[in-house]
Amino acid sequence: MQACVVAVSADPRHTFSKPVQARIRLLTGLGVEGDAHMGTTVKHRSRVAQDPTRPNLRQVHLIHAELFDALAEAGYDIAPGQLGENITTRGIDLLGLPTGALLSVGEAVIEVTGLRNPCTQIDDFAPGLLKHVAYRDEQGAVVRRGGVMGIVRTGGTVEPGMAVHVRAPRGPHVPLARV
């Protein structure tokens, strides 16, 4: 199965979920056109409160549809866009990508910067969901399953059905960390 885009979402408001769109446009160095998190500096409210001048490493949020499949087995009915992602993929181990991996979708290129850090808002959306997307493993390490974040290296239009190609960065594999 070829890796592909399942759905795309954007919202100009700072809401938890984002409505599904027919297509989104990625803007080089900025993010998703018209999305509340678009910009060169941080836009997530908690990050702005800490330091509004920090670079925005969270311009694009991607989640793998396989997470929704796993959550369905746990009794949750989650659809694309409901967890706030901009791009829902299938057929890519997003969480296993190295830092700096490049995702090419049509003309657009997204550089993966790190893991999304799910917060308690997820439990406001669906009680008990947080423990399924962020938890501690047997060794006590935090496991984050809420998708990955990235920045737009090359702009372009992204829509469902488009193939996603992964290019690993040069050098050693650097595991994704929370951004």
Image (spheres, rainbow, N blue to C red):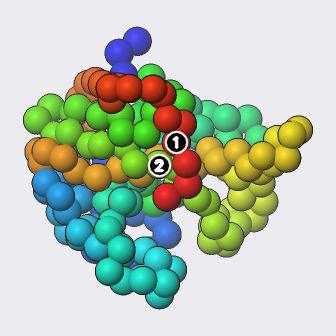
Q: Is mark 1 on a helix, strand or loop?
A: loop
Residue shown at 52% from the left, 42% from the top: 176
Q: Residue 114 carries which label?
A: 2
Residue 96 point in image, percent of width and height: 53, 30
Q: Residue furthest bottom?
A: 49
Nearer the observer, 86 or 76: 86
Residue 135 point in image, percent of width and height: 77, 50
Above-or-below relation of 75 to 85: above
Q: What element carries label 2?
A: strand
Circle 2 residues within 10 Å: few <14, some 14–19, many ≥20:
many
Q: Could you give the CA–CA distance between mark 2 and mark 1, rounded to whole angstroms?
A: 5 Å
Residue shown at 23% from the left, 69% from the top: 40
Circle 1 residues within 10 Å: few <14, some 14–19, many ≥20:
many
Q: Which mark is residue 176?
A: 1
Q: Which three-letter amino acid code belongs to the residue tagged 2?
A: Gly
Residue 55 point in image, percent of width and height: 32, 68
Above-or-below relation of 108 to 26: above
Q: Residue furthest front?
A: 171
Q: Residue 19 falls in which quadrant of the image?
A: bottom left
Q: Which three-letter amino acid code belongs to the residue tagged 1?
A: Leu
Above-or-below relation of 91 to 118: above
Circle nearer the N terminus (2, 1): 2
Q: Residue 75 falls in which quadrant of the image?
A: top right
Answer left or right for 2 relative to 84: left
The answer to whether any part of residue 130 appears in the image is yes
Nearer the observer, 159 or 132: 132
The answer to whether any part of residue 13 appears in the image is no
Residue 46 point in image, percent of width and height: 51, 80
Nearer the observer, 152 or 79: 152
Contact, mark 2 vs mark 1 (Cβ under 8 Å): yes
